[in-house]
Image (cartoon, rainbow, N blue to C red):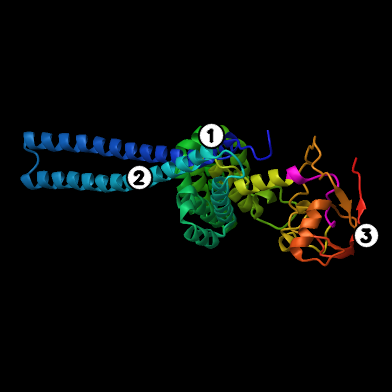
């Protein structure tokens, strides 16, 4: 297989969340519609039967019956509005799914990485990954600006989900639980199925804050309402929380429950929420941009790569040079924890030569570069450092 051969399946494997998320949201939408219908159908049958019985036995006046019918009509109109809103949401999700299937289907018409269509597809993918990463990091304005300038990625990114995630995460870091608890109620069935303790942890933190504020009576009532019901699985946490009534917050080291009063718990809650939401929607914890970047950096990393090889050179300022990306200022830090590439075949050019500063290039490639750069005859220029040397100073090398 040549370096330009293209395998669409390798790309599709990385794009599972692209199709999984709209599918999950449509299923969630359907379940919400079903819940509304079942609830209102039950009410309508009960109300209609009750109104009919009252009319038959004469216990209801005409005005009472009209009011009852008006109430049923009002409930049905409200149901219609809710279902119409859900239908609009479903149409948006269907449009996104269709666009994403078409986007992935384009891969199967590409035969080589040299095709212009592959370059076009890769450009769209890069913009999509950048938007995803920016939204995860909280740079929503930059992400939305990028979408506005690239309309073809609008249906390929899940802006609302990631914005909601970031908003709730930030609210938890700001010591607010209302938004997270509302999200937990919306996704209660998933949290129960996944045996997630997220809602309990948030409720426990709310209880701790009541103790911190000097409201023991309210804390006891809150515990009885929201914590005790989880005694089967969280009994140890509940017992520790109960002890806080005896050990109020204190800076003293001898307080055995000082860790429960730690403000770091809020950050842990925020991290737990993000992990839970990503798991719910099938999203990877590191962004896809980070995953792809790590794979690319690992493929280039060798034992000779080390920070400081090119201290004074920026990779972005010498984009067309032979500077090793791993040794550059921008990427050396990112590649520190990555494994080395496993090379089983040499990629050294067939005519390597070494400049006086120790850098090695292919002779033909170096000549072509110097010709394009307008280097004077008899001189050779290092593409990385832009230093000029006499042509006679070049030495042939024989890597082993």
Percent position of residue 195, x then y: 54, 34
Q: Which residue is mark 3?
A: 392
Q: Secondary structure at mark 2?
A: helix
Q: Nearer the viewer, residue 86 or 394?
A: 394
Give the mark nearer the N terminus: 1 vs 3.
1
Marks 1 and 2 sit apart, C-alpha to C-alpha, by 29 Å
The C terminus, quarter of image: top right
Give the mark nearer the N terminus: 3 vs 2.
2
Residue drawn at x 79%, y 42% as measured from the top left:
347
Q: Which residue is mark 2?
A: 91
Percent position of residue 144, x then y: 50, 59
Residue extent of the magenta highlight: 298-309
The N terminus, quarter of image: top right
Residue 194: mark in rendering: 1
Percent position of residue 387, x then y: 85, 65
Residue drawn at x 45%, y 41% as measured from the top left:
102
Is 79 placed left or right of 103 in the picture?
A: left
Marks 1 and 3 sit apart, C-alpha to C-alpha, by 70 Å
Residue drawn at x 25%, y 35% as measured from the top left:
42
Q: Secondary structure at mark 3?
A: helix
Q: Nearer the viewer, residue 260 or 311?
A: 311
Residue drawn at x 90%, y 43% as measured from the top left:
399
Closest to the camera, between mark 3 and mark 2, is 3
């Amino acid at each position: 297989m040549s370096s330009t051969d293209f395998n669409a399946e390798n790309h599709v494997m990385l794009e599972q969340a692209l199709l999984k998320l709209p599918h999950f949201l449509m299923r969630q939408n359907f379940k919400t519609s079903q819940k509304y219908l079942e609830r209102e159908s039950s009410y309508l049958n009960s109300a209609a039967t009750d109104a009919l019985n009252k009319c038959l036995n004469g216990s209801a006046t005409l005005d009472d019956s009209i009011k009852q019918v008006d109430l049923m009509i009002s409930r049905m109109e409200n149901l219609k509005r809710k279902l119409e809103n859900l239908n609009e949401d479903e149409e948006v999700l269907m449009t996104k799914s269709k666009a994403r299937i078409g986007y992935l289907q384009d891969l199967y018409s590409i035969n080589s990485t040299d095709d212009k269509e592959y370059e076009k597809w890769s450009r769209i993918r890069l913009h999509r990954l950048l938007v995803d990463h920016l939204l995860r990091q909280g740079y929503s304005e930059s992400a939305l600006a990028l979408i506005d300038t690239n309309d073809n990625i609008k249906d390929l990114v899940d802006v609302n989900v990631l914005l909601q995630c970031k908003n709730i995460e930030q609210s938890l870091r700001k010591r607010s639980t209302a938004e997270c608890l509302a999200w937990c109620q919306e996704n209660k069935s998933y949290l129960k199925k996944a045996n997630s303790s997220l809602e309990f942890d948030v409720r426990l933190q709310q209880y701790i804050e009541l103790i911190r504020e000097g409201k023991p009576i309210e804390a006891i009532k809150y515990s009885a309402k929201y914590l005790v019901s989880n005694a089967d699985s969280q009994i140890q946490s509940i017992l520790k929380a109960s002890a806080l009534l005896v050990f109020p917050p204190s800076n003293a080291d001898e307080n055995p429950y000082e860790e429960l009063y730690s403000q770091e718990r809020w950050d842990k809650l925020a991290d737990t929420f993000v992990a839970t939401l990503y798991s719910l929607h099938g999203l990877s914890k590191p962004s896809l941009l980070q995953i792809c970047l790590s794979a690319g950096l690992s493929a280039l990393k060798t034992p000779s790569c080390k920070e400081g090889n090119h201290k004074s050179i920026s990779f972005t300022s010498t984009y067309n040079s032979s500077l090793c990306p791993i040794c550059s200022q921008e990427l050396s830090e990112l590649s520190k924890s990555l494994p080395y590439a496993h090379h089983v075949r040499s990629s050294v050019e067939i005519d390597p030569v070494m400049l006086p500063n120790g850098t090695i290039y292919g002779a033909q490639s170096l000549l072509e570069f110097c010709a394009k750069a307008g280097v004077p005859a008899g001189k050779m220029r290092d593409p990385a450092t832009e230093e000029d040397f006499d042509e006679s100073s070049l030495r042939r090398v024989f890597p082993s």
